[in-house]
Image (cartoon, helix red, strand yellow):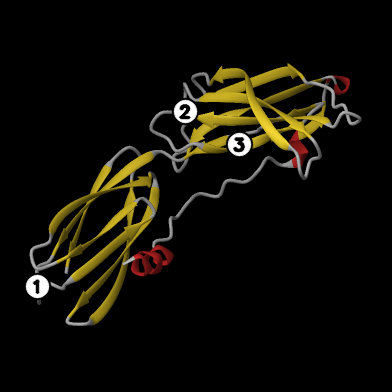
Amino acid sequence: MKKYMIILFTFSIYMSCDKQDNDDSNIIPYANGTKSKVSGQVVEYGSNKPIPGAKVILQEGYISGSLLSGRTVWTAIDTFVADNDGKYQFEFFHKVDDFDRKELYIYRVDCIKDQYFPYREKKAHKGMWTKNLNFVLDPYAWIKVHVKNVNPFDDRDLIVTSSNGGGGEYYGLNVDHIETHIAGGNNTVRIAWLVIKNNVKNYKIDSLYVPAHDTVSYEINY
């Protein structure tokens, strides 16, 4: 049934938000190249509400070898807990590259918060003040999917369900199952399913809006 899961996955497109890197106009020289500064805000996708208490982590990466072939070892060098407005700021001295020894250093900022999906890291520019380096976090949400065979044909009846955050496959006449799918809240999520009965295949796809930190019920009667 793996091939059916792959087919359904192409239908179950997650409606994720547009997360763009920081605009270059917000990157300016800082402290004669000896210091860097990073500042920004953490907000919730869809509502743009600040997320107090989000943990923003400054990471230093040590590259031994060339930029293309070297291995990067990351070390957390500072942590900032976002304030009531979701704002954070780092100011730090950065290490000097030694090109003769092929020792290079790079910096990035990560952001995590309970009940939110982690956000991919963003680059902290050396010798620059990177302003408005903002994070938009997707809140967790859930879909409770009730899958039931209401028109059984025989014990070879098959249904395969799929979304970006869950799914399953079930055979038989008496399927009556509850699935829990995790989703990005304040968003529209797509659910797809494939039904095979009497050697006839039917694909279906639907979408529904899921509020942040909430559970939405959904019925698949086939």
* Mark sitting earlier along the chain (2/1): 2
Disc 3 packing (10 Å; few <14; some 14–19; many ≥20): some
Residue at the disc numbered 3: 121
Residue 3 appears left or right of 102: left
Q: Residue at x 40, y 28 (%)?
A: 114
Relative depth, front residue between 155 and 200: 155
For the C terminus, the image quarter is: bottom left
Q: How many marks?
A: 3
Q: Say which element carries label 3.
A: strand
- Vertical order, 91 against 63 (above or below): above
* Mark sitting earlier along the chain (2/3): 2
For the N terminus, the image quarter is: bottom left
Looking at numbered disc 3 in the image, what kind of residue is underneath it?
Glu
Looking at numbered disc 1 in the image, what kind of residue is underneath it?
Pro
- Vertical order, 159 against 182 (above or below): below
How far apart in space, not on screen, are marks 3 and 1 (Cα)?
49 Å
How far apart in space, not on screen, are marks 2 and 1 (Cα)?
48 Å
Query: Picture coordinates of residue 23 (x, y %)?
Result: 71, 42
* Residue 152, label in figure: 1
